[in-house]
Amino acid sequence: MLQKPKITNKKFYNKFIYKVSLKLPGARALRLLSYAQIINFISVPPPHSHYQPVPNRGYMDWRVKVGNTIHNNAKTWSKIISLFSGVPKKDLSFRVEGESVDVYTNDVSLYNEVSQQFNDITLQRSQPAAGMEDILLNSTREIFVDKLPYGRYNYRVDLKWPTKLAWDDIDKLCNFFEAQRPRITFTESIKKWFYVNRPYMQTRRYIYVQDEQTLMLLKLRCSDNIGTVCKYVETGK
């Protein structure tokens, strides 16, 4: 039995409407290796000589680890290559994170095929609500919802970490955001995010914005810290 899908109300990466997340050992091979290289590892594990540590680095060649993982999971990887190698690049995209991969597409037949073939390693499936496929596909940075967040916010704004600001300037930026409440949602956790150490700056945060006037004010005051803006659209369902 297929896993119950999660209903998505927006496009992934402003492009795709279907997503299947898979638990896939060696997943980063999809980002680092060609299909031909993966096929080679399915058939033959890396040469034993490659187990020697990389000179002056003290760790093994990453190809050894990935290659052996692929070889040890040959059945799953054979199915992966058999299915995806024949799909045009424009119809498919991957996002790799650790030992999992998100598969994105707008082709419902491919989405169903991935769901069926890899049901045993599926972590999550996402698809639009019935009847919303074309609306979502033709939308541009819109999120379709039954009701606006908290009944008032019309926009979702992704924030960019202030890489070029001094600490005093970050103080001023946070004070500015706090002064805009409740027209925006600026929480203590988001405020702390602005002060975290640089290794963590790639984590994502977003705020809700009430109206176009407030959004314009944010863009004028701190355009360098404003990322993707999505507009909420009430479906009335």
Image (tube, helix red, strand yellow):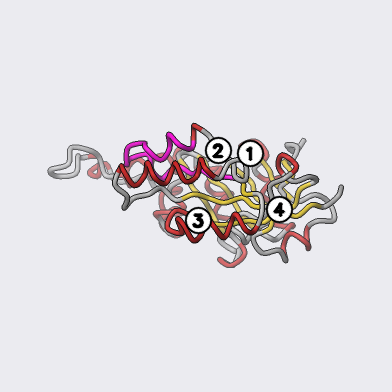
User: What numbered label is drawn on residue 227?
Assistant: 3
Q: Which of marks 4 and 1 is nearer the N terminus?
A: 1
Point 72% across, 62% down: residue: 137
Identify which residue, 45 or 155, lies in the foreground: 155
Magenta span: 190-207
Amino acid at pointer 1: Thr
- How far is the residue under mark 3 from the one under mark 2? 30 Å
In the image, residue 54 lies at what x, y percent? 19, 44
- How far is the residue under mark 4 from the one under mark 3? 16 Å
Q: What element carries label 3?
A: strand
Q: Please, is residue 180 above or below residue 135 in the view? A: above
Amino acid at pointer 3: Gly
What quarter of the picture does the N terminus occupy?
top right
Identify which residue, 44 or 91, lies in the foreground: 91
Point 56% across, 58% down: residue: 93
Q: Is residue 142 visible?
A: yes
Residue that label 4 marks: 232
Q: Which of marks 4 and 3 is nearer the N terminus?
A: 3
Q: How many marks?
A: 4
Within 10 angstroms of label 1, few (less than 14), some, or many (20 or more) residues?
many
Q: Residue furthest front?
A: 179
Is residue 217 part of the magenta span, yes or no? no
Within 10 angstroms of label 3, few (less than 14), some, or many (20 or more) residues?
some
Q: Which of marks 3 and 2 is nearer the N terminus?
A: 2
Within 10 angstroms of label 4, few (less than 14), some, or many (20 or more) residues?
many
Q: Is residue 116 visible?
A: no
Point 45% across, 55% down: residue: 222
- How far is the residue under mark 1 from the one under mark 2? 6 Å
